[in-house]
Image (cartoon, rainbow, N blue to C red):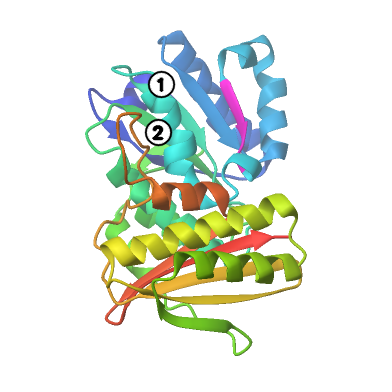
Amino acid sequence: MSTTAETGTGAFQHPALFYRGDTDYLAGTVPFVWDGLAAGEPVAVAVPGGNLELLRRELGADAARVRLLNMSEAGRNPGRIIPGVLRAFADSHPGRPVRIIGEPIWAARSAAEYPACAQHEALINLAFAGREGTILCPYDADALAPDVLADAECTHPVLVDGTAHRTSPAYDPGAVVARYNEPLPVPDTAFELPDTTDLAGARALAHVRAAACGLSDDRVADVEVVVTELLTNSIEHGSGSGTLRFWGGEGEFVCEVHDRGRLTDPLAGRRPASPRQPRGRGLLLVHHLADLVRQHAGDDGTTFRAYFRA
């Protein structure tokens, strides 16, 4: 892949790479990295562990010149990838075009995770609008379902298959954000505390119920923070109060807060916070602490749901 073809001049590029097997993967990613290094561009690679080791071996000594991240860990919650991986790297090189390989979707992603992954891919285009650089997103065309590959054509303006680049006729990231703005069914076993403003009470309830699900002390503390931040967000920016729900089982604890406000900012919680910013870090912290965050904005209000694995 040539630098010119991928980055253009002063524009952000977000191509999807459809690959089949390790040889195809390396043919589509390694020249991308080497072209960036040759051009003096900062390069980062954030892909799942197996592919990360594959790239590390192929890059050899050049791997030391690349920021390498295991996406299975750094991007466990898709909602933290833009602020914690992509923008964190780009913002650390102000005024310079960056080159990133980001692989947020792989076959082992769960059905609960995938909608957040698809929305993440769509929102990259908004988060990096007006910035110079390239984020190449590999998709395993053998292992991923056809509807996942179809979504990739909607979230990426350019598609790479082998060495061929083509414009995606299906490109429509806003449609993907809307499609996966799905209602979030609540199980009958959920505990509910309706329309509350009691932050201390919410925190105490979260502690007891998360601990009963087998979470470690550190994770229980994270749950307390997340519940506090979500309820605070509902009080200050939603309808003035929030309905809390908790449930758990099979090694997982789930909490959510619903209010009657309407979230209108699709990047809420996905923008890095400036050190000089005194407030506005609540949803960013929620994405940082939870293993998965789902949200739904509908006519009846907004719901944020956070998942924690025991």
Q: Is residue 89 visible?
A: yes
Residue nearer the viewer, 303 or 63: 303
Range covered by the magenta-colored residues: 67-71
Q: Which mark is residue 92?
A: 1
Three-letter code, disc 2: Arg
Say which element carries label 1: loop
Q: Which percent across, then down, holds residue 36?
A: 45, 17
Q: Is residue 269 above or below residue 31?
A: below
Residue at position x 51%, y 25% in the image: 44
Residue 66 lies in what quarter of the image? top right
Give the total number of marks visible in the rendering. Answer: 2
Q: Is residue 142 above or below residue 201?
A: above
Q: Which percent across, then down, holds residue 166?
A: 35, 42
**Quadrant showing the C terminus:** bottom right
Q: Is residue 149 visible?
A: no
Judging by the rendered image, the residue that carries numbered circle 2 is: 87
Say if the magenta span includes residue 158.
no
Say if the magenta span includes residue 68.
yes
Three-letter code, disc 1: Ser
